[in-house]
Image (spheres, rainbow, N blue to C red):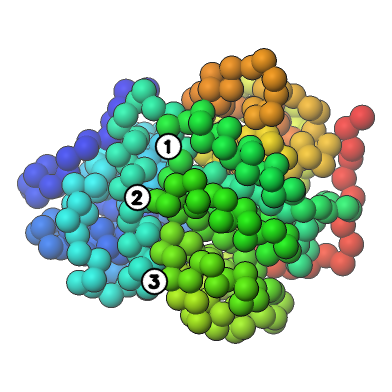
Amino acid sequence: MENLVNKNCIEPLKKNGTPIIIVAAVKEAEAIAYACKDFGIKVEAFCDSEKRKSQEGFCGLEVIHTPTLPKRFSRARFLIATQQISDVVDQLSGLGFNEFYSANELIEKFNVNSHDYAISKPFMKTRLDIYKKSHEVYFDKDKTYMRSVDVMITTRCSLKCVSCSNLMQYYKEPKNSEHDNTLRALEILNKSVDYISEFRVIGGEPLMNKDWDKIVKGIVEKNPERKVFIYTNGTIAPKDEKLQPFKANKNINFVITEYGALSRNLNNLHNQLDKYEINYSSTVADNWVDCSTIKHHKRTVAQNKEVFKQCCVKYLYTLLDGKLYRCPFIANAAKLKAIPDNPADYVDLFANNQDIKFQIKRLVKAASFFPGCDFCVGRPYDPSSKLGYDGKGIVKAGVQTSKPIPYRLIK
Ligand code: SF4
Ligand code: SF4
């Protein structure tokens, strides 16, 4: 596809012209909105695929629900505030727009400390560093680039959410991944791609794997510039000896999802992270889009292409048991043996006699769909639309199941 994203934004956006919309109402967007103000760029609004955000407002401006944009504007200039540039271009060009700008030029010399944000200043700095690098690499088409890799280190979880998008609710015998296998796979991956912006250590609940700290240490030791985000549910507060080695390490970040009383160790976790000066964000679980049903849809090729086109997690690379997948659904459905084993769905990093670099390029550049998509209800940018989506829409987050949910095993 022709590159529709402009690298330089200051001069073109300072000129009078079509409305300027910031995509989307994410954490980094707050700093980008301040940078616009500093340069005298007048922003009309934000847009976001999540409808609920349009009911609130962000940084004193309106948030337009993205699918409704064509009703409001025939043309607009879009300043991309997320790291997911490809997703934004896929979605908005599908709505008929074609003028996109990276904000890298705007934030190049932006002083994070000159403003206050909903998140802490160090956390904002980390987010902006990743943003800058992601956008920089996006413009280098010869490079194999992954915005983020989900490193799944366990299928065990201290909660069992019925709508878990990582499919934890189906595991009868959840297990931790071996830390040396995970690090070996990461080393192969690192040698085979040009750049990975962020490593997200996830589960299940990653802190249930007692070696989580060894994995995190292994990731940052290889390259001290790496940013690691540990996704946790507030049920476990790591002990002093686990956190001490990461004291004041600005590349280690915790992302906490709060599930009310279920997050029974939330305060302890906050206290421990404060004690060791470790960055974190902590937010209440919001409603989710139902995307956890495993069913063979037997769609046509055109239908599967539409499901994939609308999917908002198709760049959420997931590493599980030495295999690299394009999304957590296929990774876990394959591990559960709920979908047929199809090598087109993944790259086996431990396979012999294979050109791993070439295989990874195939996985990264694939723009159509994967065989596993035919078993997924879809995960659309716009959950209120039925386009490329067969699920229940918005569901309540964190509802628990007492027993693993049965599913059909593929023989
Ligand atoms: S807390 Fe819930 S959503 Fe998160 S991994 Fe565990 S089961 Fe899944
Ligand atoms: S299976 Fe396909 S449609 Fe479903 S989440 Fe993964 S990439 Fe998206």
Q: Earlier in the sequence, mark 3 or mark 2?
A: 3
Give the class, few, some or many, for how many residues have Cα within 10 Å of label 2's Cα (few <14, many ≥20): many
Residue 49 image position (x, y, % from top left) = 45, 52
Task: Establish if 325 lies above or below 238.
Answer: above
Residue 17 image position (x, y, % from top left) = 12, 45
Q: Which residue is mark 2?
A: 131
In this rendering, would 170 be left or right of 291?
A: right
In this rendering, would 217 be left or right of 103?
A: right
- Helix, strand or loop for disc 3: loop
Q: Earlier in the sequence, mark 3 or mark 1?
A: 3
Mark 3–mark 2 Cα distance, whole angstroms, equals 16 Å
Query: Which numbered dot is residue 119?
Result: 3
Task: Establish if 252 lies above or below 15.
Answer: below
Give the class, few, some or many, for how many residues have Cα within 10 Å of label 1's Cα (few <14, many ≥20): some
Hey, which residue is sitting farthest right in the picture? Answer: 411
Give the class, few, some or many, for how many residues have Cα within 10 Å of label 3's Cα (few <14, many ≥20): some
Mark 3–mark 1 Cα distance, whole angstroms, equals 26 Å
Task: Establish if 135 lies above or below 233.
Answer: above
Camera-side residue of 59 and 85: 85
Q: Which residue is mark 1?
A: 195
The quadrant holding residue 217 is bottom right
Residue that appears at 33% across and 62% down = 125
